[in-house]
Amino acid sequence: MPASPFKIANSIIGLETGVIESDSTIFKWNGEDRWLDIWEQDLTLKGAFQYSCVSCYQEVASKINPERMNTYAEKLHYGDLHIDSLNIRNFWLEGTSRINQMQQVDFLKRFYGNKLPISKRTKDIVQKIMIINTENNYTLSGKAGLSIRS
């Protein structure tokens, strides 16, 4: 199951389609209770990504829509995703969509190697939101997460 690492692809697709305007896009909190307290605030794109805000990315996926999401998932060669109008808000969290570790590694190699059919602007923004820690000799980037359903 793609789970949280799909937020990398979801961010890319959101930026490429214009659903996410820029790295300063704000995801407004609607005041409703969310699964984690940290999600109960307005979040920037980086905050939504770093805190793994499911509801923020469900909003992005809904606005992208199933047709465009499928088109981009195929263009990016991102696993075996099963996306339709009924599961657009959760196909990466539950159901039959799959991606294995080697496909994830291949996707990231293509991302960092400039082999994905995306703009430099999108790559730069996503690369920036993926930074976890920067020290003198290295930068640690990534996206981890969990899935509680199968």
Image (cartoon, rainbow, N blue to C red):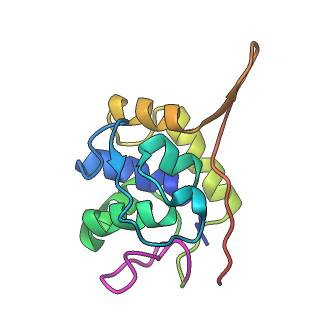
Residue 53 coordinates in the image, percent (x, y): 52, 59
Q: Residue at x 54, y 34 (%)?
A: 112
The stretch in magenta equals 81-94
Query: Is residue 139 placed above or below 15 in the rendered structure?
Result: above
Residue 78 coordinates in the image, percent (x, y): 49, 60
Q: Residue at x 50, y 55 (%)?
A: 7
Q: Nearer the viewer, residue 75 or 144?
A: 144
Can you tell which quarter of the image residue 55 is in?
Answer: bottom left
Q: Which corner quadrant holds the C terminus?
A: bottom right
Magenta part, dominant SS: loop
Magenta residue check for 40 = no
Q: Residue at x 51, y 34 (%)?
A: 127
Q: Nearer the viewer, residue 17 or 145?
A: 145
Q: Residue at x 29, y 73 (%)?
A: 66
Q: Nearer the viewer, residue 77 or 41?
A: 41
Residue 106 coordinates in the image, percent (x, y): 60, 49
Q: Nearer the viewer, residue 140 or 40?
A: 40
Q: Please indicate whether residue 82 sits to the left or right of residue 101 in the image.
A: left
Query: Is residue 128 placed above or below 80 in the rendered structure?
Result: above
Q: Please indicate whether residue 99 sits to the left or right of residue 137 in the image.
A: left
Q: Please indicate whether residue 23 sits to the left or right of residue 129 in the image.
A: left
Magenta residue check for 91 = yes
Single out the residue that lies furthest toward the front: 31
